Structures are given as structure tokens and as C-alpha cells.
Image: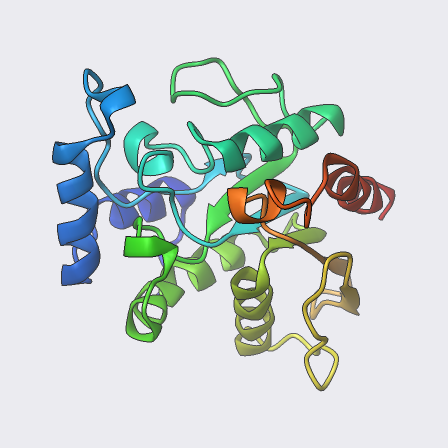
Amino acid sequence: MLIKSLPLLDKAIINCKACPRLVAWREEVAVVKRKAYADEKYWGKPVPGFGSADARFVILGLAPGAHGANRTGRVFTGDSSGDWLYRALHKAGLAKIATSTSRDDGQELIDTRILCAVRCAPPDNKPSTEEKAECAPFFHNEISLLMPTARVFIALGNLAWTQIFSTLTEMGEILPKPRPKFSHGAFYSFVGSDGEKRLVLASYHPSQQNTFTGKLTEKMLDQVMKKALKF
């Protein structure tokens, strides 16, 4: 049964304790902490989406970072991945400021919402198949609530790319077959059941594994944002 508003959905997400391994990990991290944040109070709970309820642009990530969103309580906030993403969003005119460091830093998204496929920080950034399946209804519910205004979905990484394809298919949308292969800059468009044209874009995730090695550069991420804005 779908929850019928984003505030109610956010509340349900924050209160979720469905996955014992993830609950134990996120809470342990919130107690042990990283030395640099020893004096901070960690969020230590599932992380809801952030941004406009009537967003045109929907950014899709993997899961909260243990010392990023699991610490700050805002998706893609307080770590290197967030630094990259919000810089790119600000440059594209979709974020009020170029950084996102805490829930009270004044950041606002413009016509944009960010959410993750999995809402709890997983050990080694690797949620299990069962954990992804347990969290999938939240993802489906949020996408359903955003569909009236959403026109562009930007999938950061293969999991988000796979999840949005599966979710849209479950919702009855007619998508390309077979599923387009994930790669940076990959995309597909479709006409929704409401007659609106929509675009799904792929980008490498702005994780340190990709940014430190040069697999993802600022220019590459900017190009994805520019393509989204042109749609």
C-alpha cells in the first residue's frame, strides 16, 4: 500500500528497522564515530530523500555514507561524494549553494530531489540482495509520488540505474528491451503512461573510488547535468 505524501513517507523511512544487519551497523558507526567527528552527534538512522516535492529532476544514489549522510541525516551530505554532487548541481542552477555539510547549512535544491535505493548505511557500502529488496518499496513509493512532475532521472551508479528501470517497469511504464547497459552518459527516453516524455540518464557515482582514480571527472559530471537541463 502506497504512502500518499512525502512527509509521511519520510517518517516511515526514518522509523524503519527492517534489516537487522543495517540497523546494527548504522547504530554502531554512530557510537564509535570517526575521530574527525568525535564531538558530533551522528544521525544513525535511515536517511530520507531531500529536495522539492514537485521536482523535475530526480537524482538517484546507492546508499548513505557511514560518516556522511549517516552522520548528518541528509542524503549526499558531509562527505566527498556529496561535495562533488552539490558542486555540480549548484553549477547547473539546481542547488542554492555549492556545498552540503549539515541539515541546517541553508542548502536548498531547485526543482530537484535526491534519494537513494537503500536508506541505511551498509557495511563496505555493499547492501545485500535481501536488503535491497526490503528497501525497494520505499524507492517505488517515492518515485510514484514524484512522477507527476519528474521528467529526468539521473542514476548515479549501476544499482540506481537498475533500480529505476525495474521500478518504472513495475509501475507499468513501457521501457526499452532489453534494459540498456549501464555506462557513464548512457540514457533512454520513454513516453509515460500520462503522455509525458521522460529521460533516464546514467553517471558514474561520485565516490572516491571513481573520483580519485579519474574514472569520473568534474567535466564528465557537468556534462550529464547539462544534458539533463536540455531535456
Marks counted in the figure total 0
For the N terminus, the image quarter is bottom left
Which residue is painted at 29% across and 31% down in the image?
Answer: 71
Q: Measured from the top left, where is residue 95 in percent x and y?
A: 63, 25
**Which residue is farthest right?**
230
Nearest to the observer: residue 105 or residue 64: 64
Above/below status of 94 relative to 60? above
Nearest to the observer: residue 175 or residue 79: 79
Which residue is painted at 71% across and 86% down in the image?
Answer: 178
Nearest to the observer: residue 91 or residue 3: 91
Q: In the image, is 41 to the left or to the right of 219?
A: left
Which residue is painted at 34% across and 63% down in the image?
Answer: 127
Q: In the image, is 225 to the left or to the right of 4?
A: right
Q: Measured from the top left, where is residue 77 in percent x and y?
A: 44, 30
Which residue is painted at 55% across and 74% down in the image?
Answer: 166
Colour mapping: rainbow
Q: Measured from the top left, where is residue 189 in percent x and y?
A: 79, 65
Nearest to the observer: residue 26 or residue 5: 26
Q: In the image, is 91 to the left or to the right of 111?
A: right
Above/below status of 105 relative to 165? above
Q: Measured from the top left, where is residue 18 in percent x and y?
A: 18, 62
**Which residue is farthest front?**
213
Q: Can residue 197 be seen from the camera position used here? A: no
